[in-house]
Amino acid sequence: MKVVIKEDAAGVARYGADLFRDQLQRKPDSVLGLATGSTPFSLYRLLIESNQRGEISFARATSFNLDEYMDLPPEHPQSYWHFMQKHLFAHIDIDPARTHVPPGNAVDPISACNDYERAIQAAGGIDIQLLGIGRNGHIGFNEPTSCLTSRTRVKTLTRETIDDNARFFAAGEPQPHLSITMGIGTIMEARLVVLLATGESKASAIKAMVEGPVSAWCPASALQMHPATVVIVDRAAAGALS
Ligand code: F6R
């Protein structure tokens, strides 16, 4: 695990965007693993600008998102499908047919999870996986106590994650408690993992991930066993590291 400490959030986004840019320039038909949440906003902005300047193209790329809420229609403003259209896909030259977000409203979620795994395999596996991290050490929606070899599956969200994500929902609006998420085992098969974290609220999760024992209590700690993970943090998120 390589840990890169940048001065601020803008530096984190730039470093992460450079890794994605290099990947797409080296292999235009890359399979990209993508994340939502507030952390990747600026990185996506930089990739959109690069695409619009003609430095990179997504035309031959394929993407798989990490996770999706269950029981929200894709067009719901808080669905991760909607997030990806709004913050990335609508602004780049990616073929919509090659973008994949777990189907949170599938009639048969278990089959849908297995199909998602098969689709990743059929695409040749993920070349580069973008991750954020929850304050409780989750990656995707793999909450603490998740099996470290888990595959794409239905996962209950913890109270902490529901509360953290409440900021995206209107007051009083019902909030999903279930998700479909790639498993930790799925994430561990990505050839390169790029995890971004900014701000003091992530400092203890970053410490547990980087310096703690490998444990299901901090799902991100499994990445200590991954051969090519780059953790990019700002000074605040790095603040608890020894
Ligand atoms: C999002 C995801 C989550 C977030 C994490 C951090 O697709 O998988 O694990 O990366 O909850 O969220 P933010 O970036 O909003 O702090």
Image (cartoon, rainbow, N blue to C red):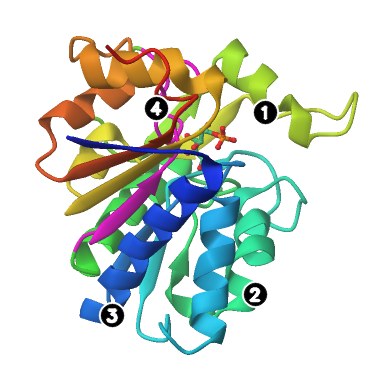
Q: Which x, y percent locates residue 41?
A: 60, 52
Which residue is nearer to you in this view: 209 or 15?
A: 15
**Residue annotated with mark 1:** 165
**Residue annotated with mark 3:** 25
Q: Residues within 10 Å of mark 2 (few under 14, many from 20)?
A: few
Mark 3 or 4: the one toward you: 3
Q: CA distance from mark 3 to mark 1?
A: 34 Å
Circle 1 sits in a helix, a strand or a loop, which is it? helix
Contact check, label 3 and label 4, Cβ < 8 Å: no
Which residue is nearer to you in this view: 223 or 8?
A: 8
Q: CA distance from mark 2 to mark 1?
A: 23 Å
Circle 2 sits in a helix, a strand or a loop, which is it? helix
Q: Is residue 149 visible?
A: no
Residue type of the residue flagged with mark 1: Asn
Residue type of the residue flagged with mark 3: Gln
Above or below for 172 versus 24 = above
Residue type of the residue flagged with mark 4: Asn
Task: Please provide the residue range marked out in magenta.
Answer: 125-144
**Residue annotated with mark 4:** 142
Q: Is residue 123 visible?
A: yes
**Residue annotated with mark 2:** 90
**Is the CB–ligand 1 distance for label 1 below 8 Å?**
yes
Contact check, label 4 and label 2, Cβ < 8 Å: no
